[in-house]
Image (spheres, helix red, strand yellow):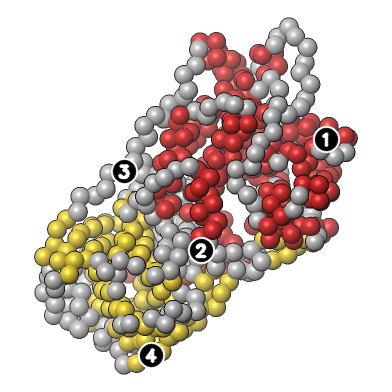
Amino acid sequence: MQEGRDNDPSVLDPEGGTPAPRSEVIEPGRALALTDFSLPSTTAGERFVRLAYRLGVPGSILTSPLGPKSKLRLLATVRAPIPGSRVGGTALRAGHFQVHGARTPIAQVDYSGVARMPAPLERLVHGFSWLADLEACAPRAQVTPVAERILTAWLQANPKPPSRPGKGPAWTVGHTGSRLLHWLIHAPLILSGDKALRSRTLRSMAETARWLDRNVDNAEDGVAQVAGWCAIVAAGLLLPDGKPRRLFGEMGLIKALGDMVSEDGGVLSRSPLAQIEAITLLVRLRACYRATRREPPRAMEAMLSLLVPPLLALVHTDGGLGSWQGSWAIGADELATLIEATGVRARPLRDVRQWGYQRVLAGKSVLQFDAAPPPLPRHARYGCASTLAFELSHAGQRLIVNCGGAASAGGLVPVRLEQGLRATAAHSTLTLDDVNSTAVLINGAMGPGVSEVDIERRTIDHGGASATRLEASHDGYAARYGLTHRRILILRDDGTELRGEDLLLPTGRKAQRGKVGCALRFHLGPDVEVGLFENGAGIALPDGSYWQFRAPNCEISVEDSLWVDGQGRPVATQQLVLQGLVSRGGATFGWLLKKMS
């Protein structure tokens, strides 16, 4: 650790003294733009119908004012576009809900929501996504009794919708929208048995759709609102006298999508999980259009094309997802199935400025870098103080990771760990005085901290080899400690060497006195073995390759860590930690990660 040094951002050799390499600025990638993000063309009569329905005129009066009331039924059978989990379905047949490795007996679930459950279990139970799991694990005749048993218990505990959202977890807009959409898509599982249950379920579908008509604007966040609108449109497609509801729902859905997604296609919560949920909702809604032989609005297809490339930017060399903003390392098969269902063929975005992630593909390595403030409180679900953290994978193996998995807390990951998994220390970046760079609040929200991030991306010629250079800084510690954190990363184009420098720069004209504790963390991937030597560490990957980590003039230690795997389960890992006291006048950490064999 070197203090008070006049820092050149290009000086990155941990041994010291490397002259600034020649560099060339890359023009930032152009953000994708919606080609057509307007409402479908409608006649004057359809616009009138949409307005009247929005004002409360029943759909049956608008479609056939003088005719008899239509019989309540489903107009088409939907083919589920995304298969569920066979493991989850098998657990249901054995009498348990299974979520992130934790099992809960079906008989012990309080479907009324009076006794609160962990959030992942609430999403599964009240969102009825378990229907897809049942359908994936066995022939329909074998799983229908299980579906009817759970549905009957749920309907008995929730005989009618409340007056407004928030009356228990069953009646949030997000859970209600998911539930109705799954009821409609997996209707053969719940409508092919007992006639009395069939009639009761159809009435509940109609009541739920009317409840969403009135309450969708009171959703808890943008993704929940999109779920509500998707369910409204699906009900308009599949229930009788639905044209007014469909026209009303399409208008609301397109507006909600526009409010939720940034210009480059990333959701404003910056969460890969929310990105996946938005894509999944649109894919399922498109299946409802296809079942009724209707074309979805062009704006919806354009949005799908916009949402996929940013998600691909966070895919590692093993095909799985990076651990950002509450997400866990969702596996390659699950991710590939979703992307295939979209029908979108696109390359990953490398420079997603609005969503805030940088991606560098170099040889067999992928570097992911968080170069933006955390999401605003109104958008955050499981907001994390991860600014300037990075992940690195090589040849299908994860080398440097973040802990991830805050959204899975309540399965095998204890709920008490959620706050810790959202903290700066749970990410591969720098912390001061064990304080988060942005305050981590309850219910997924974020408080004061990082408000601005400067980012520059260049290609450079360095010692006869080319490389990508990322430089970013944040102000999260400026107000409390008078220091700005700047991180510089240089990844060689062959992917075998990552050089880094972390700088603490005073923000005022007059440096403050005293020192503050500092820690620089590098969380290691699963099954990685590490051993220390003077000023460095040796890192052995499962494939037998060997990497060296060097950080001259720094005290290095190995500590326990935690990584949440593709099923949302905790895995014990280790981390390299550089720590000590730094002057309020500034300090520099230089380090090198290099493949040796």
Residue on which disc 2 sits: 329
Q: Nearer the viewer, mark 1 or mark 3?
A: 1
Marks 2/3: CA distance?
26 Å
| In the rendered image, the vertical position of residue 212 relative to residue 134, given as above or below | above
Residue at 74% across, 59% down: 90
Q: Point out the image quarter for the C terminus.
A: bottom left
- Judge depth for marks 4 and 1 and give the one in front: 1
Q: Is residue 256 above or below residue 378?
A: above
Mark toward the start of the polypeptide (4 vs 1): 1
Residue type at numbered disc 3: Ala
Image coordinates of residue 338 in percent, x first then y, are 53, 49
Tell me where residue 448 appears, x and y as whole percent. 41, 57
**Which residue is at 81% across, 60% downward?**
95
State the residue position of label 4: 532
Residue 406 image position (x, y, % from top left): 55, 63
**Cα–Cα gap, marks 4 and 3:** 44 Å
N-terminal-most mark, 1 or 3: 3
Contact (CB < 8 A) between labels 4 and 2? Answer: no
Q: Quadrant of residue 294?
A: top right
Give the Cα separation between the discs numbered 4 and 2. Answer: 27 Å
**Residue 341 vs residue 197: left or right?**
left
Q: Which mark is residue 31?
A: 3
Which amino acid is tagged 4? Leu
Amino acid on which the number 1 mark rests in the picture: Arg
Residue 8 is at least partly visible in this image: no
Q: Is residue 575 left or right of residue 69?
A: left
Residue at (37, 34) in percent of width and height: 34
The x and y percentages for residue 467 are 22, 66
Nearer to us in this view, 397 or 119: 397
